[in-house]
Image (cartoon, helix red, strand yellow):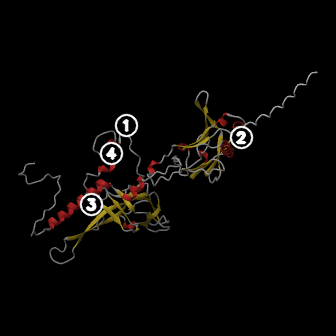
């Protein structure tokens, strides 16, 4: 731009620059406030998007009562703050009365009005105050928002930087820009007047907060319809959200994922299990006792009984073939039995090992008696809790400082090493009787 050009490009913002002893005009003061307001709204829109910040819970009591909307805040698509102190909302207070019964989306909108000074003189009718607030509106139909992740095709590998770049509309690619960016660079449209009042609102930038029913309260078909609110349905499903920093921190920590974990593995009555487990070399007698009783598994939360079966929980014996110097693995036949079953779920399970296997491998002579280890495997991707979530398969002795390091759907493994059977030394041979001296011959 040439130095002699006194005008800046239209895309630039403009604010007054004050000097000493200057007399301020209304235009300068208003321009300063408008510039600061525009910057704040653009910043809100760019950093936070639009949606409910907190509150605005919609409830209704039985009978022909109005809706109650709790105190809350929201940001509309142009970065304007929508604040509601809490209170009742009647049909008569809506932007427009419904013309039929049905399900509607209740949305909150930015509204404003200009208030004259009310004094005398030539300027008495000019607006001296701008009051801002919110109004509510019913929109036909009610649909849940699509919160599914936008993912690239399987044939295209996209890294984190590329994903962020394309979703922020900074680069063309196979991923579309985030939908809120459609409004990021747009200007608010003209405000619409509500009836014959002096209140104006933005009908295009409302924030949905609930699905509500409208019904005719008059049972007599001859009377004119008398509309009233019915049940309140979906709330969380239809709302866009603006994540406050404390809430975002909770989500980063994974506070919403309270997955079931393995709390303890109890190898027999003489060992209470836990994170420490057994020592590396369990005597054969203790190992045999543990398998006769069957190991017990304790979960932190109830899991579905029908998901705990030989395919998801099993024991494997691992032996060392000494002559060929390789390992042999053998599945131990066992079935999990719930110990505290309730409504198809249980927290404690005991693995009952097949009695025939106990008789053949423990009571009689077998390769197990030369020592080895037993592994208990729990497949977290096959076990479900009451909420139909995976099992968190982190080890017993792992307490992560950052909960996102959990392992939903992985495999939990507990190890039991046992020593070879000790045999009593054979008794020493009895001494042979001394031979009698030969008889003398005469």
Between residue 336 and residue 188, name the one nearer to us.
Answer: 336
Q: Secondary structure at mark 4?
A: helix
For this view, does 156 lie left or right of residue 121? right
Earlier sequence position, callout 2 versus callout 3: 3
Q: Secondary structure at mark 3?
A: loop
Return the mark for residue 164: 4
Q: Position of residue 101 (x, y in %)?
A: 44, 59
Earlier sequence position, callout 1 versus callout 3: 1
Relative to residue 288, is residue 61 depicted above or below?
below
Earlier sequence position, callout 1 versus callout 4: 1
Return the mark for residue 355: 2
Crowd tier of the residue under label 3, counting other residues whose Cα lies within 10 Å: few below 14, some 14–19, many 20 or above: some
Residue ID for mark 3? 191
Earlier sequence position, callout 2 versus callout 4: 4
Single out the residue that lies furthest toward the bottom: 120
Separation of marks 3 and 4 at Cα, in angstroms: 34 Å
Separation of marks 1 and 2 at Cα, in angstroms: 52 Å
Residue at horizontal 45%, vertical 55%? 255
Residue at horizontal 42%, vertical 63%? 57
């Amino acid at each position: 731009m040439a130095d002699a050009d006194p005008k800046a490009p239209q895309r630039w913002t403009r604010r007054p620059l004050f000097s000493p002893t200057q007399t301020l005009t209304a235009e300068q003061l208003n321009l300063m406030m408008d510039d600061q307001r525009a910057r704040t709204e653009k910043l809100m829109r760019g950093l936070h998007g639009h949606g409910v910040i907190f509150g605005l819970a919609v409830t209704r009591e039985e009978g022909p009562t109005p809706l109650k909307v709790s105190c809350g805040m929201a940001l509309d698509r142009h970065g304007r703050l929508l604040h509601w102190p809490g209170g009742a909302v009647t049909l008569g207070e809506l932007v427009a009365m419904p013309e039929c019964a049905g399900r509607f989306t209740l949305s909150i909108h930015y509204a404003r009005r200009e208030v004259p000074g009310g004094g005398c003189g030539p300027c008495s009718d000019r607006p001296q105050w701008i009051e801002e607030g919110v109004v509510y509106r019913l929109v036909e139909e009610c649909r849940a928002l699509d919160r599914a992740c936008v993912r690239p095709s399987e044939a295209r590998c996209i890294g984190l930087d590329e994903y962020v770049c394309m979703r922020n509309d900074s680069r063309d690619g196979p991923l579309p820009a985030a939908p809120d960016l459609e409004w990021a660079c747009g200007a608010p449209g003209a405000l619409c007047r509500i009836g014959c009042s002096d209140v104006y609102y933005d009908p295009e930038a409302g924030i949905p907060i609930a699905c509500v029913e409208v019904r005719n309260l008059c049972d007599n078909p001859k009377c004119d319809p008398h509309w009233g609110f019915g049940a309140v349905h979906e709330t969380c499903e239809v709302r866009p959200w603006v994540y406050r920093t404390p809430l975002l921190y909770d989500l980063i920590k994974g506070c919403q994922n309270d997955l079931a974990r393995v709390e303890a593995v109890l190898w027999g009555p003489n060992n209470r299990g836990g994170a420490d487990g057994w020592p590396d070399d369990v005597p054969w007698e203790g190992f045999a006792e543990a398998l006769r009783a069957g190991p017990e598994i304790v979960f932190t939360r109830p899991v579905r009984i029908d998901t705990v079966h030989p395919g998801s929980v099993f024991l494997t014996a691992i032996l060392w073939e000494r002559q060929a110097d390789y390992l042999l693995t053998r599945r131990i036949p066992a079935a999990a039995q719930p110990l505290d079953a309730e409504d198809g779920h249980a927290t404690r399970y005991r693995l009952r090992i097949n009695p025939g296997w106990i008789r053949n491998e423990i009571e009689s002579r077998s390769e197990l008696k030369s020592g080895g280890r037993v592994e208990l495997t729990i497949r977290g991707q096959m076990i479900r809790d009451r909420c139909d979530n995976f099992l968190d398969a982190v080890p017993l002795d792992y307490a992560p400082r950052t909960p996102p390091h959990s392992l939903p759907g992985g495999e939990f493994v507990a190890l039991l090493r046992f020593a070879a059977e000790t045999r009593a030394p054979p008794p020493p041979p009895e001494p042979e009787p001394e031979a009698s001296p030969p008889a003398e011959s005469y």
